[in-house]
Image (cartoon, rainbow, N blue to C red):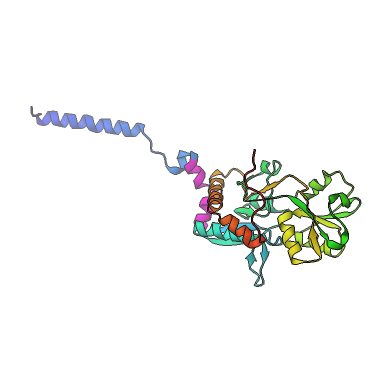
Amino acid sequence: MKLSNIGARTVSLFVIAGALALSACTKVSTPAESGGASAAAGSSTLRAVLQRGTLRVGDCLTFAPFGFYDKNGQPDGYDVDLAKELAKQMGVKLEVVNTTSANRIPNLQTSKVDVVFCNFTRNLERAKVIEFTTPYVVASEALLVKKSSGIQSVKDMGNRTIATVKGSTNGDEVRSLNIPIKIQEYDSSQAAILAVKQGQADAMIEDNNFLAYQAKLDPELTVTNEALVPLEYNAFGVKAGDQAWLNYLNLFLFNINASKLNAQLYKKWFGTDPHFPLNPPF
């Protein structure tokens, strides 16, 4: 049956009125209003890096072979290679910001850098103020000494001087050994190594990977064959509360570990395969 013109107009008016009522009750949120993952990603360091076009990585460039300046004055090393790979995969330029152990956390908190690669041991105290990715390299601690010193282990260090780096956990580790050792702090790893070479300190305690490289460079030095502390799981440090950036970095690490690229870079710089697995057996 065909509707009259008046009936058709009446039906149309009801349809339009219903549509207007529905649109008035249904609000489409903008990304800024929607919250959750979209808002988090919008305010994340990840978004900031992509928009800026530059990734700023804090790296300790006095900690060869993790980070150092090459003969042309350019940043180089294991951590720098990882930073280059991250920037490449993000499609951005890389800026390496020379960092010390003491200013790693302040540089993150003040957004001077986007992420820190700097022999950063994960611990609960640091995790109160920043966040860590999954580990990318594992180490323990040993002593760097002169071969002529007669020091075979930390047990031989009674009443001697040990060099540590300001801002690192090494001083606390030495104190926990309950051995009468004098602790002398230095601004950088290179300064602590020089103190051992010049006889200002009897030993330096540090990451065994780093120390093995230093002993390789100087035949007068050697590394004690011991693990002074439980294994240390080193990671990237990021500003607290940035879950989107943390997720991205964790996926990056998963990919380079699964592809064996991380292991290949480790062998390039340390001359051996990684000593310890990234995931401990529980």
Judge from the rendering whether residue 185 lies leftward or rightward of residue 136; answer left or right. Answer: right
- Look at the image and say whether residue 274 sits in the magenta stretch: no
Q: Is residue 195 above or below residue 42?
A: below
How many labels, in total?
0
Pick whichever, 71 or 114, lies toward us: 71
- Look at the image and say whether residue 43 sits in the magenta stretch: yes
Q: Position of residue 238 (x, y in %)?
A: 61, 49
Judge from the rendering whether residue 25 lies leftward or rightward of residue 132; answer left or right. Answer: left
Q: Is residue 13 above or below residue 56?
A: above
Principal secondary structure, stretch drawn in magenta: helix
Q: Position of residue 51 (x, y in %)?
A: 50, 56
Pick whichever, 111 or 91, lies toward us: 91
- Residue 243, located in which quarter of the rendered image? top right
**Which residue occupies the extreme left position in the image?**
1
Q: Position of residue 7 (x, y in %)?
A: 13, 28
**Which residue occupies the extreme bottom position in the image?**
72
**Magenta part of the chain:** 37-52
Q: Residue at x 66, y 61 (%)?
A: 271
- Residue 162, located in which quarter of the rendered image? bottom right
Q: Residue at x 82, y 48 (%)?
A: 174
Q: Report the quarter where the N terminus lies.
A: top left
Q: Residue at x 34, y 33 (%)?
A: 24
Pick whichever, 158 or 183, lies toward us: 158
Q: Is residue 166 visible?
A: no
Q: Residue at x 91, y 51 (%)?
A: 159
Q: Is residue 11 visible?
A: yes
Q: Report the quarter where the C terminus lies.
A: top right
